[in-house]
Image: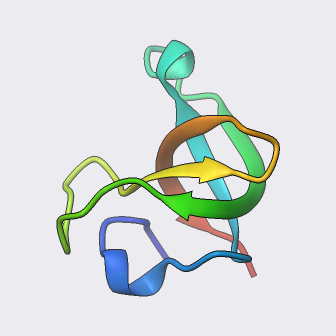
Amino acid sequence: MDGQHRKDIYPGLAVAIILKKDQRTGKLTEGVVKDILTSAPFHSRGIKVRLEDGQIGRVAEILD
């Protein structure tokens, strides 16, 4: 599942995000959502979140 819809994302969810510095390479960083930073219900490049370790990026995929 992709991370384009805000309704699919909630604190405590395991996700893979793309950090700003990794946008060119597409390198994914895995972690657990702490805060949802995007207020819109949909974002074409992924909902922006803060992970529990403090890193911020856009959700590329939702992990099971």
On the image, the x and y values in percent for residue 19 come to: 56, 29
Residue 64 horizontal side relative to residue 19, left or right: right
Q: How many marks?
A: 0
The quadrant in which residue 40 appears is bottom left
On the image, the x and y values in percent for residue 9 come to: 49, 77
Q: Nearer the viewer, residue 54 or 48?
A: 54
The quadrant in which residue 62 appears is bottom right
- For the point 66% across and 63% down, the residue is 33
The quadrant in which residue 7 appears is bottom left
Q: Check the picture and name the quadrant holding the C terminus.
A: bottom right
- For the point 55% across and 19% down, the residue is 22
Q: Nearer the viewer, residue 8 or 64?
A: 8
Structure colour scheme: rainbow
Question: In the picture shown, does residue 32 fall above or below 18?
Answer: below
- For the point 51% across and 52% down, the residue is 49
On the image, the x and y values in percent for residue 53 come to: 82, 42
On the image, the x and y values in percent for residue 39 come to: 24, 63
Residue 58 horizontal side relative to residue 29, left or right: left
- For the point 40% across and 53% down, the residue is 37
